[in-house]
Image (tube, grey):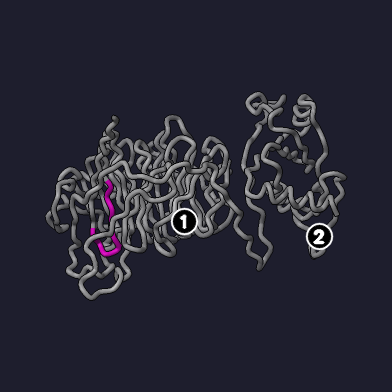
Amino acid sequence: MERKRDYATHHRKIDGERLVILAFYYSKAGIKALKALGREREYHQMNEWPLANYSDSLVTNQRRLPKKRKTKPTRRKQAAAGRATQCPANFLLVARNDGLLLECEMSKFPLQEINQEEDGRRLEAAAPLHREEEEGEEEAPPVVRDEEEETEKARCEWDFSLSSSILPPSTSLCGTSDAIGVIEIDPSDTILATGGSARKIRIYTLRPLESRGFHDHASTYDYYICTPAKLSSLRWQPDSGGRVIGSGDYDGVVTEYDLEKRVPVFERDEHGGRRVWSIDYSARFPSVGASASDDGTVHLWDSRSGAGVAVVQPGSMSPVCSVEFDRSDGSTLMAVGSADRCVYVFDLRWPAPEPIAVLRGHRKAVSYVRFLGSGSIVSAGIDGCLKLWDVHAAKVVRTYEGHVNARNFVGLAVWREGGLLGCGSESNEVYVYDRRWKDPIWVRGFEPRPLLGQSGCGGRFVSSVCWRQQTSGECTLVAGGSNGVLQVFTGKKKETWFA
């Protein structure tokens, strides 16, 4: 009885901890590497039953089969169960392809020194995939605790103000026929593009919008391009100099437009008519793009040749809501947000991409993922929170709460140089967070406000946001609403006086 209690306590302490699995594709070399470390011990055998279904004793290594088990699991499920095994944070489980698990202390296991095995085969480091759930049984989300504790209250170091408000062409501000679903600023920070349910890509010059005033669309946008379907995503091609913009639409088609000629120059339809929720381009390989779709896949393609590069399918067939490449110098990472509540991180150097990390913590679908810097990802979910992740440790650094998001896409944008996060809210407000604090540092109700006698916001919400990626002491945040209103906010760094 004492042994069972110790075992249960052990597992409670490690709930939600990261587990790294090293797969030795040649088991002989793997055993030799572990013997050199002076710590080798058989931990479990997975030849008959999944490891996760054993009730084990850490002292005697005795095991008992589960009480209810009708069918023998497949070898694939055995491997998935083994990868999902929990262990203390300072221990490492090493899995060989014959099912034998060994345990050794991470402090005695210098990963950087074991790069290649003797026969030259690959040594792969990867975070575990989640266990396959039993039919009719939903797995409870893990308990995730923030890695960093705040020592001071959130404070706003910026003076934000509304610079301009652009009213929709429709006379009714309560309608959603002109909802803005996506806002993108080009790499030169001079051109603004919007898209949404109006089936148009509107192009603006950003600088005039930073001057104060109220305008309408007809007097502010430079021109527009009509599209065959509603738009869910826009992204500028990195090496085009603001000339080519890519789009993903509700018909499942990815299209690139030449803005000078105002015509499509590339089209790809590989998602079987399922919505494309998000597209992005690699900064390292500018012609390589990715599209995330309702069909549960991410397609990688080369716009120069028109050929497909790879098809990535996260751990389930749930819709994929967001995809983004890491823009850090030399990085080959790609993050994917899925409706199965997980964030998947891929390294595109592998011929057949498999996730190197699976980040769990959201209670509902992950709607957006954004790289904040090298090794840092911000995710948004319809559970009403943002999460900052340390990719290398596969842990939550901080959870940001305050905005309302239980149903719709409300946008997520990060200003990398300034460390600021922006998002919308179903309360029809714009929220700004500083990466250092979990509470918002600035909240602004979206204009125009409800008319006299009108309750609430009439179902309106902020549906998209975008930061201008400038590096000076000023910042610009552009936000769009479900009623077609576009607003530009500017901020200046507050002066700090010292005695």
Q: Nearer the viewer, residue 218 or 44?
A: 44
Identified at 41% across, 50% down, the residue is 439
- The residue under label 1 is 381
Q: Which amino acid type is shown beneath numbered disc 2?
A: Pro
Q: Residue 489, how many percent across, how many down?
A: 24, 49
Amino acid type indicated by mark 1: Gly
- Segment colored magenta: 477-485
The quarter of the picture where the C terminus appears is top left
Give the residue at x 64% y 35%: 124
Q: CA distance from mark 2 to mark 1?
A: 35 Å
> Residue 54 colored magenta?
no
Local crowd size for mark 1, using a 10 Å CA cut-off: few (<14), some (14–19), many (≥20): many
Camera-nearest residue between 7 and 286: 7
Up the image or down, 402 lies above or below 99; here it is: below
Q: Which residue is mark 2?
A: 66
**Circle 1 sits in a helix, a strand or a loop, which is it?**
strand
Counting from the top left corner in percent of width and height, residue 196 is at 30, 59
Q: Quadrant of residue 273?
A: bottom left
Vertical comparison of 324 with 252: above or below? above
- Left or right: 4 in relation to 474: right
Q: Nearer the viewer, residue 133 or 43?
A: 43
Mark drawn on residue 1: none
* Residue 103 % position (x, y): 76, 37
Is there any visible trace of residue 423 in the rendered image? yes
